[in-house]
């Protein structure tokens, strides 16, 4: 999901959310484009609870405003709780998180916190037009994040304004045109 320019909630302003679960009880996801200042290797000794070496590097991402354990989206099926998209998995189990961190696993993103919606809340936001919905892709999850919102918002917004066009320069504030 991609926050539309009009969504001004500071928790989701200019965010791209990977929806992990959505059912009659509610929805849960993680914000892909909010890397924190702290790197996984800086806190690894607290996570591992032993002297094991950290085999991965990169920032821990702020997954959303809800408190939660350290979580990971990754490509190792053997340590997954669920599949997100084909070949991409999720886990929040501490033993699986440790296994992911000890591997030389290039395709893993760690998150602290998550985005959560109660029953019907996300549907209401979708009906209000707060989000674009698009298929999650490997590149969105594991690729560069600094311009992810702008790139997706431009493509998705341009497709609605100008059907048939794949990319168009649409400003954040259309009144600035």
Image (cartoon, helix red, strand yellow):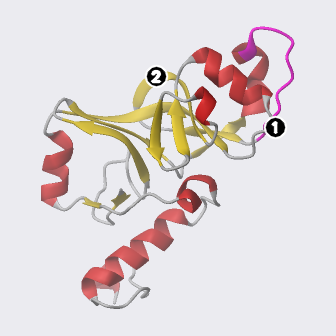
Residue 168 vs residue 163, the one in the foreground: 163
Q: What secondary structure is found at the residue carrying circle 2?
A: strand
Determine which residue is flagged by label 2.
68
Q: From what the image shows, is residue 126 above or below residue 11?
A: below
Assign the N terminus to one quadrant of the image.
bottom left
Frontmost residue, 149 versus 167: 167
Where is 167 relative to 26, above or below? Answer: below
Residue 77, x across and y down, in percent: 59, 35
Tell me what residue is drawn at x 12 percent, y 57 percent.
127
Of the 4 image quadrants, the one containing the C terminus is bottom left
The number of callouts visible is 2
Image location of residue 67, percent across then percent down: 43, 23
Q: Residues within 10 Å of mark 1 (few under 14, many from 20)?
A: few
Residue 118 seen anywhere in this rendered image of the structure: yes
Q: Is residue 43 left or right of residue 153?
A: right
Disc 2 from disc 1: Cα separation? 25 Å
Tag 2–tag 1 contact (CB < 8 Å): no
SS for callout 1? loop
In the depicted view, which residue is nearer to us: 177 or 41? 41
Reading the image, the residue beneath label 1 is 104
Quadrant hosting residue 130: bottom left
Q: Position of residue 89 (x, y in %)?
A: 53, 39
Disc 2 or 1, which lies upstream in sequence? 2
What secondary structure predominates along the stretch shown in magenta?
A: loop
Residue located at (60% from left, 16% from top): 94
For this rendering, which residue is in front, 93 or 49? Answer: 93
Q: Is residue 51 magenta?
A: yes
* Residue drawn where x is 39% and y is 61% of the image: 135
Q: Which residues are magenta?
A: 48-57
Where residue 17 appears, x then y in whole percent?
Answer: 41, 50
């Amino acid at each position: 999901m991609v926050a539309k320019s009009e969504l001004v909630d500071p928790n989701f302003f200019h965010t791209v959310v990977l929806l992990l679960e959505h059912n009659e009880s509610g929805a849960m996801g993680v914000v892909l484009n909010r890397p924190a200042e702290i790197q996984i290797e800086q806190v690894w000794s607290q996570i591992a609870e032993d002297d094991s070496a950290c085999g991965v590097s990169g920032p821990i991402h702020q997954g959303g405003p809800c408190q939660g354990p350290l979580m990971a989206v990754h490509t190792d099926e053997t340590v997954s709780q669920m599949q997100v998209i084909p070949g991409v998995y999720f886990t929040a189990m501490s033993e699986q998180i440790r296994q992911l961190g000890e591997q030389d696993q290039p395709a893993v993103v760690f998150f602290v916190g998550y985005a959560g919606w109660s029953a019907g809340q996300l549907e209401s936001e979708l009906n209000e037009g707060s989000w674009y919905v698009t298929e999650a892709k490997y590149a969105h999850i594991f690729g560069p994040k600094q311009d992810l919102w702008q790139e997706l918002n431009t493509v998705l917004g341009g497709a609605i304004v100008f059907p048939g066009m794949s990319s168009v320069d649409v400003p954040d504030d259309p009144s600035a045109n």
